[in-house]
Amino acid sequence: MNNMAIVPYESTTAVIPYGEAMPGQKQGIFFTMPEANFEWMLEKIRGWFAGREEVSLVDFGYSDKRGLGYIIMEWIGREVDPLFAAILRDEPFIDDYTVYTRSEEDC
């Protein structure tokens, strides 16, 4: 008889609170990375979110001061995908990121 049992997973990291996006709002994420990782990451983003109508690739390019690659994405009527935010938080090549919320009226 096999004595292996499924052990419930418990996270040891804090959950990042994003709040709940309301209809009529967009929640977005802005993140930066070294130039060496930029093209690779941009192609990953395009592949991961292809066909996701609620996710928009708003802008991408290089910053003026330090030449960092940046990507701006928005979720329409939804909060930023928590798993995606966790990936950005944990990947060492991501320099920084921020989550923001704005009204569609501000667009």
Image (spheres, rainbow, N blue to C red):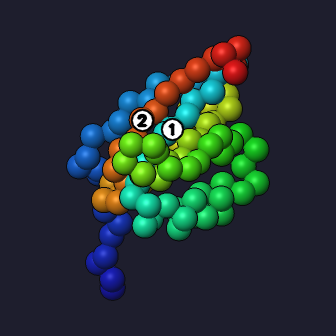
Circles 1 and 2: CB distance less than 8 Å? yes
**Which residue is at 63% across, 36% downward?**
75
**Which residue is at 49% across, 39% downward?**
30
Q: Which mark is residue 29?
A: 1
**Which residue is at 33% across, 39% downward?**
15
Work out whether residue 41 or residue 48 is closer to the camera in this orientation and state it.
41
- The quadrant of the picture occupied by the C terminus is top right
From this viewpoint, which residue is outermost toward the top? 105
Residue 40 in sight in this render? yes
Q: In the visual, does 107 lie left or right of 82?
A: right
Work out whether residue 83 or residue 90 is closer to the camera in this orientation and state it.
90
Q: Residue 29, image x and y in percent?
A: 51, 38
Check the image and report above or below for 106 versus 63: above
From this viewpoint, which residue is outermost toward the front? 65
Question: Which of the two labelled residues, at mark 1 and mark 2, occupies the earlier sequence position?
Answer: 1
Amino acid at dot 1: Ile
Q: In the visual, does 107 lie left or right of 81?
A: right
Amino acid at dot 2: Thr
> Dot 2, crowdedness within 10 Å: few (<14), some or many (≥20)?
few
Res 24 → quadrant = top right
Element type where label 2 sits in the image: strand
Q: Residue 88, image x and y in percent?
A: 41, 51
Q: Which mark is residue 50?
A: none
Element type where label 1 sits in the image: strand
Distance of mark 1 from mark 2, alpha carbons?
6 Å
Q: In the visual, does 102 lie left or right of 62?
A: right
**Which residue is at 26% across, 46% downward?**
13
Q: Residue 97, image x and y in percent?
A: 40, 41
Residue 85 in sight in this render? no
Residue identifier under label 2: 98
Check the image and report above or below for 31 versus 44: above
